Amino acid sequence: MTLLRSALSGICLLGVLGSGIGLARAAPAQQGPRATESAAAMKARQKARIAFGARKWTEAEASFEAVLAAPDAAGMTAVQRAEVLGYLGLCELEQGKHREAAEHLGQSLEQDAALSRALLDRFTRAFNRAIEHVGRIYVAASPPDAEILLDGEPVGTGATVHELFVAPGTYTLRARLSGHGEGSQRVEVDAGKTVSAALQLVRAADAPARTPAPGARKSEPVKPQAPGPVASWLGPARVAGIGLTTATASLGALFMVRASASNGDLKERNSKLDALGFTPWACREPSPPSACNELAVLRRERDQFAALGTAMVVASGVVGAMTVASFFTDFSFLQSEPTGARVAFSPAATPGQIGLVAHGVW
């Protein structure tokens, strides 16, 4: 009995010591401002997810926005930020805030590598639903570090191309930069549509202003020089090059598809001749079967369409390469402003089509 009591006492003592060691080891993890901030951020995200699960869209939206505005928001991982932006967009979409939803879902999808496949598919579907109700504007300015304003409200600076989501309507875009004249353009955007705008700023006159003598008549303000002859034809030539490249590539593809179809017909006719017992040399005999004439016509059509398709594709490649090269060529020796940094390509997707949009000033 005494031995049993001693054993139990030893076990209890070991349990107390183990608990003490566990507490001693766990205690430091609770200390420090970084651990406290991380716990607060985790709690805020959990609160937002609970409100989202309960379909309390207004509360969830406010909670997700609070997570993004928190002092330690910069410490979020790419996965956490992409998820918060995506869920915020879903909350806004449920409330009919299509412009805000498209903006936040688009920012989330920019970090698609950080999202799981399920969330990527969910956010993509929601983004496509949102942009059916809003318009999208791609605006580029030259120089690219100019500040862009939409109806007088700053929307960003320092980017080659700005992507803006707006409600359907008419808007005024302006670009301004110190030492340059202001550029502006008015655009009309429909729901589900994408428009592009290019704003070019002209550098102000470099001549220093002189103080006029007393009583002297004020001189007229110096007007900026008009662009040179090269700048006047270079833009239309590039537009024509893009259109010609697209047209020739499309025609070439159609011709090659037609040639492939003719080749299929040839194989089918040859198979029928083989089934009837004709040898491959039957069409070379003095009295060939009537089907040989049809085969000869099909061969000529196939060869003609194949040659035309190949020529069109090669031509589109040459014209396209020359057009792209012109965007990155410095024409300053022809009194034209270099354009290497004034063009960019951005993906554009609508419920009915997907492709690339070229933005720039030329």
Image (cartoon, rainbow, N blue to C red):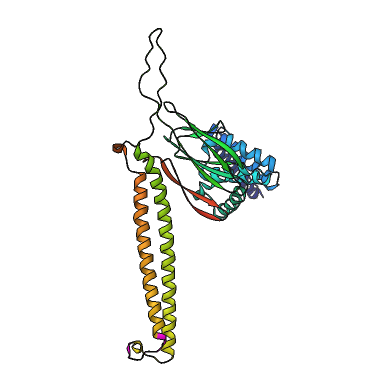
* Residue beneath the point at 37% across and 69% down: 306
Quadrant where the C terminus sits is top left
User: Residue 280 magenta-drawn?
Assistant: no
Evaluate whether residue 43 shows in this view.
no
Nearest the eye: 59 or 226? 226
Evaluate whether residue 134 shows in this view.
yes
Nearest the eye: 91 or 362? 362
Q: Which percent across, then down, holds residue 111?
A: 50, 46
Q: Which percent across, then down, holds residue 10?
A: 60, 45
Nearest the eye: 304 or 59? 304
Q: Which percent across, then down, holds residue 15?
A: 61, 44
Q: Which residues are magenta?
A: 284-291
In the displayed orientation, state which residue is furthest to the top: 214
Is 244 on the left or on the right of 96, as rendered?
Answer: left
Q: Which percent across, then down, holds residue 314?
A: 35, 60
Is 340 on the left or on the right of 152, as rendered?
Answer: left
* Residue beneath the point at 35% across and 91% down: 287
